Amino acid sequence: MLRPPMRLLSSLLRPFAGKGEGAGGSDGAAGREGQEGLLWYRDHGLCSAGEFSMAVVQANQILEDQSQIESGPFGTFVGIYDGHGGPDAARYVCDHLFSHFREISVGPQGVTCDSIRRAFLATEEKFIELVGQLWSSRPDIATTGSCCLVGVVCQRTLYVANLGDSRLVLGKKVGNTGEIAAIALSTEHNANMEAVRQELRSQHPNDPNIVVLKHGVWRVKGIIQVSRSIGDAYMKHPQYNREPINSKFRIAEPTNMPILTANPSVTSHHLQPSDSFLIFASDGLWEHLNDQQAVEIVYNHPRSGSARRLIKAALHEAARKREMRYSDLKRIDKKVRRHFHDDISVIIIFLNHDPAVKSAQGPHLSVRSALDH
């Protein structure tokens, strides 16, 4: 009899296994950075919030996912930017969102939900300005956009801001049972969610085609799955909804208000000693692993290489769904690989609640995922 898929995955990933969740880098890979074909990784590092692991795998012809981790006096900043329609918007966000956040957060209020929201909106404003500047030479930039998931750990508070369908999941220890619970901390904006469709219909009561079921997937105007993003200027400003952009993006009906918004859902969470780790990942991961599967993989293996391990678990599952071996999937090149899975970005933060240890960790850090593979 065949073993259940996730038990099979666990056995396939066993070469990475060690002493469990508390083992930090016991496999000798601490700090290692490298590349395995289309997979880039930084297995282990230190930040002001604790320890981290980071990885990304490419599926598109040009990598559309971008990600970063920044650590400094403000705390730890994590960004996952899942681009669509091309890499331009995600790359722009990765280049500029953090600098807007840092600039806004140096004031007397410091890091707040409002300062993070303002950083998102400032990034959107500047990107739309860039679209206008490049309209005559590169009109296709008007059809690029990016989901944006940001987490900021400042003192004992976690701030979460999200546009689109990337996801942040908390791994929380359940008393003294040795078990781990998965708690989603981000609000998602995908038209396949009933609440998102209701929100769009309430915002556009006179548009019967604001969401359309197309090939079994709900899409905004039959084109895009997410209702919030940075970029996608053609969905927000009528002057970009015209030739020479590709006809598949052009919306026939006139619009008197933006269809999409760049206003993120922002929340704060007071961190507890039982809050063990945070998994930030683009939608490509969650297409193949559910929240509980992901936190158990992280919890039951050494910290070093955790992000890479999660991506490999997702790839094993993607291969299983297509009734092929993981070794065969690895041989498929980018662009063709997109038929099997999306770009996947993962950053895991292992939270340190000991102030004495925190003060010993280097406060300044800046790591970005590889631009392309």
Image (tube, rainbow, N blue to C red):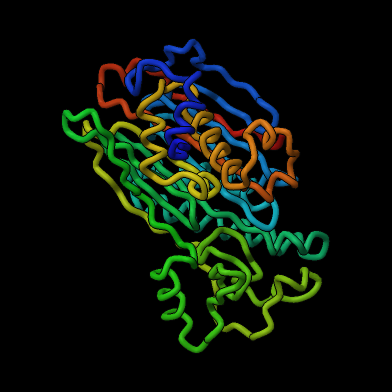
Numbered label tally? 0
Residue lying at the far bottom in this picture: please name it. Answer: 206
Q: Return the x and y of residue 67 as percentages of the image width and height.
A: 56, 39
Relative side of 207 to 46, left or right: right
Q: Return the x and y of residue 46 as percentages of the image width and height.
A: 43, 21
Relative side of 83 to 77, left or right: right
Front-most of residues 195 and 88: 195
Front-most of residues 112 and 266: 266
**Picture quarter containing residue 147?**
bottom right
Q: Return the x and y of residue 168 as percentages of the image width and height.
A: 41, 45
Residue 103 in view here: no
Identify which residue is drawn at 50% across, 58% down.
164
Residue lying at the far left in this picture: please name it. Answer: 176
From what the image shows, is residue 272 above or below residue 121?
above
Identify which residue is drawn at 59% across, 75% down.
221
Front-most of residues 47 and 171: 171
Identify which residue is drawn at 35% across, 21% down.
20
From what the image shows, is residue 101 above or below residue 76?
below
Front-most of residues 135 and 354: 354
Identify which residue is drawn at 70% across, 44% down.
337
Q: Return the x and y of residue 281 as percentages of the image width and height.
A: 49, 43
Query: In the picture, which quadrant includes the C terminus?
Result: top right
Relative side of 172 to 237, left or right: left
Relative side of 350 to 173, left or right: right
Residue 54 in view here: yes
